């Protein structure tokens, strides 16, 4: 039997699976995914820098917007809440390396299982509205973002990301001040975080305090060197023959997974059992989900729960009555409205973007 995960409780959080403590990386246990929205206290935690904020004085905090703009801004939380139209959407926030531990051969990095993600209702201000208030000048190319976290050493590059101007102004990217109707948890980016729906969480800058409009392409370690993927289909490459061209990671890929039964859970024979899971992609929307209870020999359609929006995950269910005791190999695959389907095999050097057809082994007793 594998070792049981170590559960820890950080401020504002329930018991989560400890990955690292400096900086904190905490994984959400699978059973929290059996609901539409992931509770704030159970939402996973991923920081890059050891120097993370542990308190923020809202009386003095300001969001700075500067650079290639006509009117630099310094906005308080009161300004953001009362001077701009509030908007909300439900969106999956998923770490680029979610499920990395399942890559074969293994790759370096946090050995997440499937819990480096969550689904939440985000409320805040359209980034486009903030940029319009600041008056973006002609010729602007990129928008850079950084937060209150600080590197441990002077030579370590601060965590900063960027979006192309057209993406930044698409009306969906937001600066969020609420998560599931409450203030953001400190460990998830209080008081503000960037929300980039449909894109991996590396762009969702936490404790956001600076937005910089640039008249040229952004260059920085976390875009030019880190979080890059091969340009090959599905970001797939072969160990020993790595792709020569890479680009910054971007839109989330299509995937599905099981949340019930959990690994090592026993299922009684001849009794109806509801298999449950999730499916999501980068914003095209889930068209259908299929489940196999015989290791992929046959497939049947699962029932989809109501659609909460194209950036939300879609919960699915499948009623199963195991005919006899023994070991069963369950599989699930999803199809989206863009005609995409999951791949059967994926490997890359960084352990990013896992989207293979998922399998779980179940013992029926």
Image (tube, rainbow, N blue to C red):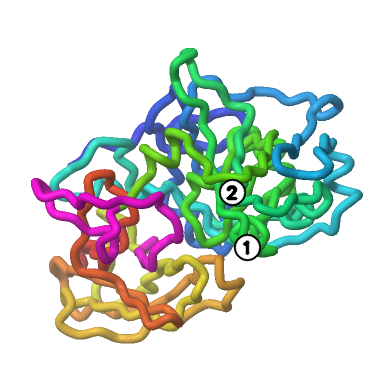
Rendered view: 267 above or below 184? below
Local packing at callout 1 (Cα closer than 10 Å; few below 14, some 14-19, many 20+) is many
- Tell which tag, 2 or 1, sits nearer the viewer: 2
Of the numbered discs 2 and 1, the one sitting upstream in the chain is 1
- Is residue 181 at all visible to an observer of this figure? no
Reply yes or no: does residue 254 show up in magenta: yes
Count of residue discs: 2
Local packing at callout 2 (Cα closer than 10 Å; few below 14, some 14-19, many 20+) is many
Residue 268 spot, x, y in % from top left: 27, 68
- In-image side of 32 versus 340 (left or right): right
**Gap in Å between the C-alphas at discs 2 and 1?**
26 Å
Residue 265 spot, x, y in % from top left: 29, 57
Residue 236 numbered mark, or none? none
Give the main secondary structure of the magenta stretch: loop
Q: Residue at x 60, y 72 (%)?
A: 309
Q: Residue at x 30, y 39 (%)?
A: 111
- In-image side of 320 versus 2 (left or right): right
Q: Which residues are magenta?
A: 230-259
Q: Residue at x 37, y 33 (%)?
A: 19
Residue 164 spot, x, y in % from top left: 56, 54
Residue 90 numbered mark, or none? 1
Tell me the quarter of the image containing the N terminus: top left
Assign a secondary structure to mark 1.
strand
Closer to us: 141 or 308: 141
Closer to us: 3 or 24: 24
Q: Residue at x 43, y 47 (%)?
A: 95
- Is residue 159 at all visible to an observer of this figure? yes
Q: Residue furthest top?
A: 154
Q: Which residue is mark 2?
A: 142
Assign a secondary structure to mark 2.
strand
Residue 358 in which image quadrant? bottom left
């Amino acid at each position: 039997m594998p070792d049981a995960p170590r559960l820890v409780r950080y401020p504002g959080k329930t018991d989560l699976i400890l990955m690292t403590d400096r900086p904190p990386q905490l994984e959400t246990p699978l059973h929290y995914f059996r609901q539409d929205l992931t509770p704030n206290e159970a939402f996973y935690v991923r920081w890059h820098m050891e120097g993370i904020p542990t308190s923020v004085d809202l009386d003095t905090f300001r969001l700075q917007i500067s650079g290639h703009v006509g009117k630099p801004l310094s906005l308080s939380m009161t300004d953001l809440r009362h001077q701009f139209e509030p908007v909300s959407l439900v969106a999956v926030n998923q770490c680029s390396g979610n499920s990395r531990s399942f890559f074969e051969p293994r790759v370096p990095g946090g050995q997440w299982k499937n819990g480096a993600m969550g689904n939440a209702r985000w409320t805040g201000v359209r980034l486009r509205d903030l940029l319009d208030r600041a008056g973006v000048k002609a010729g602007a190319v990129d928008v850079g973002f950084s937060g209150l976290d600080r590197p441990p050493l002077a030579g370590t590059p601060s965590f900063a990301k960027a979006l192309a101007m057209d993406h930044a102004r698409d009306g969906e990217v937001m600066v969020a001040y609420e998560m599931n109707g409450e203030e953001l948890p400190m460990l998830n980016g209080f008081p503000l975080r960037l929300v980039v729906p449909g894109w991996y969480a590396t762009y969702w800058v936490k404790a956001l305090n600076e937005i910089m409009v640039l008249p040229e392409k952004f260059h920085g370690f976390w875009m030019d060197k880190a979080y890059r993927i091969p340009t090959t289909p599905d970001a797939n490459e072969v160990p020993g023959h790595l792709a020569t061209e890479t680009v910054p990671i971007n839109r989330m890929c299509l995937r599905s997974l099981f949340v019930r039964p959990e690994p090592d859970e026993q299922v009684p024979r001849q009794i109806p059992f509801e298999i449950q899971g999730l499916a999501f992609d980068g914003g095209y929307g889930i068209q259908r989900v299929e489940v196999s209870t015989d290791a992929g020999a046959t497939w049947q359609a699962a029932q989809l729960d109501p659609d909460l929006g194209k950036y939300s995950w879609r919960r699915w269910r499948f009623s199963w009555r195991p005919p006899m005791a023994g070991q069963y190999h369950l599989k699930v695959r999803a199809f989206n409205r863009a005609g995409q389907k999951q791949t059967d095999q994926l490997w890359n050097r960084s352990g990013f973007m896992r989207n293979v057809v998922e399998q779980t082994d179940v013992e029926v007793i």
